[in-house]
Image (cartoon, rainbow, N blue to C red):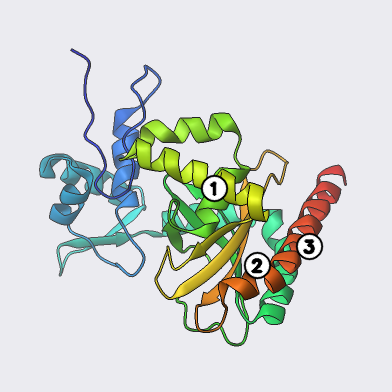
Amino acid sequence: MPRQRRPRAADDTQPASEDRHFVTALARGLEVLGCFRRGEALLGNQEIAARTGLPKSTVSRLTHTLTELGFLHHVPAMGRYRLGMAVLSLGSAMLGGLDIRRIARPLLQALATETHSIVALGSRDRMGMVYLELARGDAAVAVNLEAGSRISLGNSAMGRAWLAAATPSERAALIPQARDPAKLEATIARALAEQAEFGCCCSFGDWQPDVNAIAMGFQPGGGLPPMVVNCGAPAFLVSPEYLLQEARPRLRAVMRKLEHCMDLAMTA
C-alpha cells in the first residue's frame, strides 16, 4: 500500500502527490516553519504538532534541528520557539532579488495617493496570496496590511486575478491541492468570467465584509510567476462603482507601465 502523508493543518492545501524525488523530511521541516502566522511570535511543540498533524516526537526533533540551523530560536523560559535569523536572511535575499518591487514602488504609491486606497503587488504562495510591495493612500490607514501579509486565494480580488492570469496548466496543478477541489474550480470559473467582463477581478465584501477591491494579474517575465496589482480600501471609502469606473482605468495604466518597465529591464 502506498505511503500516506498527513495533510497540513496550517494551510488550505493537501500534500503534493507522492513521487520518488519528494524529500519528506525536508517537507516536514518546512511545514514547521510555515506554522508561524502573522502576529504569532511564539509557538510550542504541541501547537506545531496540532497544526501540522505530525507526532509531537517528530516535531520535537524537527524544532531541535531547525534551532541548530538558526531557522528557529528556542526561548527556554517559555518552552517555545520563534522564527530565527536564518529565515529573515532567506526572506531578505528573496525580496532583494525582486527588481520588480523597486520598479513598482513609485507606481503603486502614485495610484494609492490618487485613489485614497491601498495598492499592492502580490503573488501566490500555496493556496494564499502574499503582498510583495504595498502603498497607502492618506485615507486607507484602517486596513492592517503590509509587505509580507498573506490573504486568501479564493476570496480576494488579488487571488482571483492571479487565477485569471495563470496558465491553464498552473491552474490545473492547484486543483488537487485544494481541500475542496470543486470549490476551487468554481472560483477559477468566476475569476475567468470577471476577467472577461470587467478586465479585472473583484471582491466586494468577499475577503472582508467591509473591504472592497479590484485586481489585475499579469505575467512579468524573467522567470517570475504570475503577479497581481490590486487596489482596495474600506467600503465606506471606496464603492464598487468607484473602483470599476474611476480606479480601474488607472489600475490598468499602472499595470501596463509595470509590464513595459519589466520588458525594458529584461532587455537591458
Above or below for 139 versus 264: below
Task: Give the number of marks.
Answer: 3
Above or below for 32 versus 172: below
Q: Nearer the viewer, residue 94 or 243?
A: 243
Q: Secondary structure at mark 1?
A: helix
Residue 194: where, in percent of width, then height? 59, 51
> What distance separates the C-alpha of mark 2 from that of mark 1?
16 Å
Q: Identify the image quadrant of residue 244.
A: bottom right
Residue lying at 37% horizontally and 16% vertically, measured from the top left: 20
Q: Which mark is residue 117?
A: none
Look at label 1 and name its amino acid. Answer: Ala
Residue lying at 54% horizontally and 76% vertically, measured from the top left: 233
Look at label 2 and name its amino acid. Answer: Leu
Residue lying at 62% horizontally and 54% vertically, measured from the top left: 228
Above or below for 96 versus 183: below
**Viewer-nearest of discs 3 and 2:** 2
What residue is shown with label 1?
Answer: 191
Q: Residues within 10 Å of mark 2 (few under 14, many from 20)?
A: some
Residue 84: where, in percent of width, then height? 36, 59
Residue lying at 37% horizontally and 24% vertically, measured from the top left: 22
Q: Can residue 137 be seen from the camera position used here?
A: yes
Q: Of the two numbered discs 1 and 3 on the same chain, state the one appearing first in sequence.
A: 1
What residue is shown with label 2?
Answer: 244
Q: Secondary structure at mark 3?
A: helix
What residue is shown with label 3?
Answer: 253
Look at label 3 and name its amino acid. Answer: Ala
Q: Can residue 97 be seen from the camera position used here?
A: no
Residue 162: where, in percent of width, then height? 57, 48
> What distance separates the C-alpha of mark 1 from that of mark 3?
21 Å
